[in-house]
Amino acid sequence: MSTGLFWFTNDLRLHDQPALWKMQSVDKLICVFCVDPQWFRPNGLNAKAMGERRYQFLYESLSDLNKQLQAVGQVLIIRQQTPHSALSELIEMYQVDVIGRSQHAGVYENRHWHLLQQQFPDHQFFTEVSHTLFTAEDLPFAVKDLPGSFTQFRKQVEDLPLPRPMSSPQQLPPPPGPMAIEALSSPVLKKSVFKGGETAGLMHISAYFAADLPADYKNVRNELDGWNNSTKFSPWLAQGCLSVRHLLSRLKQYEQQKVSNDSTYWIYFELLWREYFQWYAHRYGARLFRFDGIKNTRSRRCYYPERYQKWCNGNTPYPLVNACMKQLNETGYMSNRGRQIVASYFIYELNLDWRFGAAYFEQQLLDYDVAANWGNWQYIAGVGADPRGGRQFNIEKQTRQYDPEGEFIRRWQGDIDIIPLDSVDAADWPIMPPPRQ
């Protein structure tokens, strides 16, 4: 009798789950997700890894996953511990033989995985790819030889044969007897247009491709707001409630049955951007979080507490930046164009250490993905994959181009509570004269 353990991470679904399919070879199976208490504590970059809205989306995704597992004879075990601590306890308690997971680009997740392998050298460990379109073997280059720019990457991979997604398993091996299931604390529910979970993600895919939206995507993708002005797949992709291979298969089906044009290609184009940053994270590991990035690029940017707080709260001198940040804080979402604008402002106008902005996005964004988030911030800051050495945007020009009538700014009240940028210096010493008596 063999017992397996499957560690869910950013793959909270049953469809297109090659690692979970492989687990069908064991007699008994434990399915587990680890909620690390450290996610909810302030880190060294003045943020938390998991904000309230992210936690709500995760909670909904885990609840849905548990329902899906119950339908195939399984149950999701939640452990509120570090992954190494939780998984090692379960391996010893239930005499687990086989431990499986999906490939993950995160340094944190891989560190725990390697610790487990060192602790249990005689056990069988395996990893399967489920978060990317391609496997490392599919790529026409070694991961260590990843092209230095997205354009070079795209030219080499965009015509590769696309792997077909796998179906959902109809039955899984049962758990090894009754198991204690920890109850997660319920989130403070906030109104959201996004609902976590595989069920909601698949419904969104069906609704999107049932409409004419894909055929017009390229024309509206730079809009700052509006449900239909972007695909909105990213939260479910980031948490793994949707498989990127399944999404691409639906896109190809749409092109075959309805229309194939520049807009439908552009959806694939942006999925390739996501793909590039996934392999970028695998290639560079912990260098994803370094101040000087992958290029050892030095700068004088630092941390100004007052400027940072005004950026976070949307109280800067620029109404467009304010509106984008208030949208993020209220919804957990921001358009791609908005993200580029506020990141550029953070780095080049406020002269702040880009990592603090990336960490705040990690806390707030429903669609936070370690590779896409930190890779994009490095790109804008000029310490990553951008061959131009950074992207600085003219905020006034961006306002005229993308919100010429001020509609977006008014909707998110970006033009109120505008106060002077600095009243203290970087060391919190006053720089404004005291008011007259």
Image (spheres, rainbow, N blue to C red):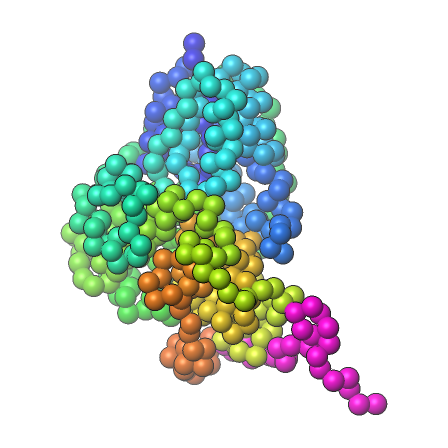
Q: Residue furthest left?
A: 256
Answer with the quarter of the image where residue 395 lies: bottom left
Q: Is residue 379 magenta?
A: no
Q: Residue furthest bottom?
A: 436
The residue stretch that appears in magenta: 409-437
Which of 250/297 is in front? Answer: 297
Q: Residue at x 51, y 28 (%)?
A: 115
Q: Decide: is 199 above or below 101.
A: below
Q: Decide: is 187 above or below 21.
A: below
Q: Where does the image place residue 319, in percent across and percent down from the top left?
A: 53, 78
Q: Residue at x 21, y 50 (%)?
A: 156
Taking the image as shown, residue 423 lies to the left or right of residue 289, namely: right
Taking the image as shown, residue 281 lies to the left or right of residue 426, namely: left
Q: Where does the image place residue 176, in percent across and percent down from the top left?
A: 50, 16
Which of 105/390 is in front? Answer: 390
Which of 153/313 is in front? Answer: 153
Q: Decide: is 123 above or below 344.
A: above
Counting the numbered discs, the total is 0
